[in-house]
Amino acid sequence: MTPRRPAAPAANRSRLSPPAVAELLVWALVVLVPLVLMTTLRDPFGLPKRLVAEWLALASVLVLAAGAAWRGGRRWSVPGVRELPAVRLVLPLLAAAVVSWALTVHRAHAATAMADLAIACVALVAWSGGLEGWRLRRALTVLAVPAALLAAVGILQFHGVYRLFSFQAGLEASRYGVTSLAGNAGQLGAFLAFACVVMQALLPRSRAGWPRILLLAAIALGLYGVVVSETLTALAGVLLGSAVVWANLLPRRRFALAVALAVAVAAMAVVAVAPLRDRVTSKAQELAAGRINAVLTGRLDGWRAALWMVGEHPVAGVGPGAYVSEFGTAKLALLDRGVPFYPSHVQPVFANAHNELLEVAAEWGVLGVAALLWALWVVVAAVRRIGRGADAALARGGLAVLVVLSLTHFPFRLALTGYPALLWLAWTLRRSREGAADDVAAVDGAPAVGGKVAAPSTAGRVLAWTVVVLLAAALALQTVRAQRLLRASRILNAVERTTVQMAARGQLPPTLLWANLRLLREAGRLDPSSVGVVIAAGGEHLLLAQPEEAEQVYRQALELEPRPEVWLNLGRAQWSRQERAAAVASWTTAVRLAPRMIGQVPAPARQQVHRAAQRSPGWSGDASRGAGDGR
């Protein structure tokens, strides 16, 4: 039986306490972040979600810290903070990241990644230490709202009933047309898989009647949303996570019947949904033929690149957030060894390794792997300390689905999935630390031990107000940072659209191009890590017949991310400067990285580039006519 939750203390019920305000901010994060969309941005999905999530997370932490400081800093002491499981989890991770950041040459990407990591770590510590277990669990229940909405939009897109966006020809009929508000089908599937597992674990605690009916409806929508996303990783995650949940909720015999029913329903879904049936069939055929990389939809490419980076930078990795900066170099090195790459990628550059452990290994080296394994040990120990019943189902089911997603996806690299996962982790650590007493709320939102409240101390007051000042400064900096990044993305999107539209009309006046360059210089100052801004600036220089300036800009882009389109455009600048051999070499590199780009090489050099690429090891251009990378 699930132990009955103790009533929340009257002190927290009678007024809007700091924990209550912080909880409302967490609710806003859970509900609003999946729905955030800014169509004026170059990245309308991921960037605004991340910035809004980080701002709300910092705001909730600031409220908790200010509330504790206002009440005299009770229980604020270095030994007390050190006892928090979340602190033991994040400190090694931060230490490994700092070492990697100090040694990397990719400063712009590392700065962005370190800011994101720091905010996530602060949120995890504050939520698990400052919010009562019943508040954290209630915030997880709110996941039903965005999950139902995103699933509904995805289902309507799948059936062609309603589309929020326009796509290129043919994409509406493919899984790429099921984006909902997530960004792509893979991200939608991952979010819904985690939400569905959490909602199932929360069913026993839901009130009978309409609340439970609505939660069941949200689960049904979410499960169908996973199916129409055709994301096999998400489908595997939700199946395993659901099995773990019900194994902790049902007697053994009833659980066996539930598993049989779930398998039957899953098989019926595969048979009934034609695109999913075709996808599963093709994967089975590829597995039978021994084409493992095809079964994994090219993920071996990302894994091999990560292992290459580990071999080149074993101790501290390539730097936080620098995987994308090193992927092109890794791919060329592996091609030189004759390693074949998956030929059917639409986007041949991996921004993520599609495996959380391997990406940590690539970016942070063995120090990061050790820190991550320690963090996993802390989490597993916390999950094991939770007894049986609904709480155990929530802890173990959430862990199961996140492990599956982390093996072939990157749930912690996305705000859409990362912050719900952090909220689950905060609840798990809180619940394991205080056991059944996790629902006894502290009057100031700080962690209590045995329900006792320590007397205020001078050291506690000083520490509390110092933390408040630092958090207020961090929130102000995050506000400025968000404005800068949004402005840069908005500029890039506007410049690209204007240039394309005017070029289609055959009107590209120099005044427009110079104005675009001024805007792009501003965007570059606002977001130094954006390779898209640099590439766009190079294109404006080419349109202004300034190949020398364009070449300089493209070389800057190569330092950020050696993408195939950068090599292609660098070749155009070199060709315009009559540097024929250098241009052919650049185009050959571009085509080796992305064989489909051979069609974009100017006709006079195309055959020469094609022959040069064919002579290189690992060439797969003749097999590059597949469709979709399916990630």
Image (spheres, rainbow, N blue to C red):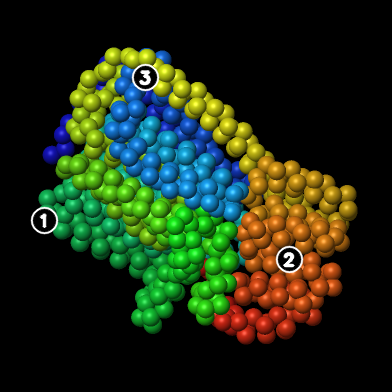
The relative height of residue 167 versus residue 295 in the rendered view (above or below) is: above
Label 3 or label 1, whichever comes before in sequence order: 1
Residue occupying the point 58% across, 32% down? 477
Q: Nearer the viewer, residue 177 or 102?
A: 102
The relative height of residue 599 versus residue 372 in the rendered view (above or below) is: below
Q: Residue 460's mark? A: 3
Crowding at label 1, few (<14), some or many (≥20) Cα neighbours within 10 Å?
Answer: few
Is residue 365 rendered to the left or right of residue 530? left
Residue occupying the point 66% across, 61% down? 558
**C-alpha gap between disc 3 and disc 1:** 53 Å
Residue 578 visible? The answer is yes
Label 2 or label 1, whichever comes before in sequence order: 1
Is residue 444 rendered to the left or right of residue 630? left
Asked which secondary structure carries label 1, the reply is: helix
Is residue 387 rendered to the left or right of residue 342? left
The relative height of residue 565 versus residue 118 in the rendered view (above or below) is: below
The residue under label 2 is which amino acid type? Asn
**C-alpha gap between disc 2 and disc 3:** 58 Å
Asked which secondary structure carries label 3, the reply is: helix
Residue 142 visible? The answer is no
Can you identify the residue that label 2 sits on?
569
Crowding at label 2, few (<14), some or many (≥20) Cα neighbours within 10 Å?
Answer: many
Crowding at label 3, few (<14), some or many (≥20) Cα neighbours within 10 Å?
Answer: many
On the image, the x and y values in percent for residue 170 come to 59, 66
The residue under label 3 is which amino acid type? Gly
Give yes or no for contact between labels 2 and 3 (Cβ–Cβ under 8 Å): no
Residue occupying the point 54% across, 27% down? 473
Can you identify the residue that label 1 sits on?
253
Q: Quadrant of the N terminus?
A: top left
Is residue 245 rendered to the left or right of residue 489? left
On the image, the x and y values in percent for residue 70 come to 41, 15
